[in-house]
Image (tube, rainbow, N blue to C red):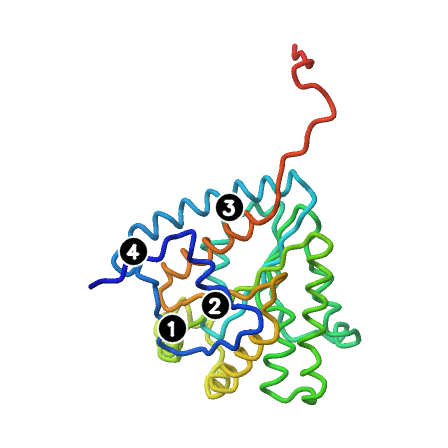
Amino acid sequence: MSQRPVPRRDLPDRLRVRSNSRPKLSDSDADRCFGWEKDKDKAVAATMENLARLEELQYKMYADGRFAMLIALQAIDGGGKDSTIRRVFGAFNPQGCTVTAFKAPSAEELRHDYLWRIHKQAPARGEIAVFNRSHYEDVLIVRVNDLVPEDVWSRRYEQINEFERLLDACGTRVVKIFLHISKEEQRARFQERLNDRRKNWKFDTGDLEKRQQWTAYTRAFEAMFARCSTDHAPWYVIPANRKWFRDFAVSQVLMYEFEQLPLRFPAPNFDPKSIKLT
């Protein structure tokens, strides 16, 4: 008997990492579609509906001016962060949405605490900020490559939780999305970059070293979920082997998160009916 698709409204709940849980990442989970395998066309159509709705919700949040949203996007190399930003976050009006890619810190950034450069890019009220990589690099690459001692990076989990609690208390909803692909899918995507001359530029020989660190990164991601998925800033693990399902799931999560905010259009400080245009 074929599995019935998980209803759209229930999908975010299935993807959310519960607070104080200890989830494990498996390659098989990266291919899950929660019963939507035979309804791909419906999922693609639903994604387009979601993107239209997200555009409306962003407009309403911008007009409201009381709330903001910070979306942190993490994945292993080849996980699809760039294409997700293009295909899903492209629904947002760029006048109210910024995208920041966090690479290795600059000399100036290294002279400050590790959250300094992050806080600078947090969204103003009414706006959305998308982070391509994020403050979580300081418990990921820093941990895997032993860039700082364990007693330093291990304290950062709670520091990050407190930072996100501050943002939430000030009206910024923090939504954290992890794009989960399998090791075999990563190999296939790297091979595609090597085979396609138009994509050669996307391949970095340093990615081969990181691929050898797959197990270490998996453990670091699992610890990140266990220590930092909270009610005020949840992690969502998105099965991302199939790009069409990834886009559907991410758009569904974003729509759910927006609808948790009590958005409203502000009342005018005049009577529109009293205005006579000539």
Q: Which residue is mark 2?
A: 237
Of labels 4 and 1, earlier in sequence is 1
Q: Which residue is mark 4?
A: 40
Residue sitting at 50 percent across and 50 percent down? 255
Of labels 3 and 1, earlier in sequence is 1
Closer to the observer: label 4 or label 1? 1
Camera-nearest residue between 205 and 163:
163
Give the image location of residue 6, x and y in percent. 35, 57
Residue 54's label in the rendered image is: 3
Please, is residue 13 above or below residue 28 in the view? Answer: above
Q: What separation in Å lies between label 4 and label 2 (alpha carbons)?
A: 20 Å
Of labels 4 and 3, earlier in sequence is 4
Q: What separation in Å lies between label 4 and label 1 (alpha carbons)?
A: 18 Å
Left or right side of 163 for 251: left
Q: Which amino acid does the dot numbered 1 rest on?
A: Asp
Closer to the observer: label 3 or label 1? 1
Give the image location of residue 209, x and y in percent. 50, 87
Please, is residue 74 above or below residue 155 in the view? Answer: above
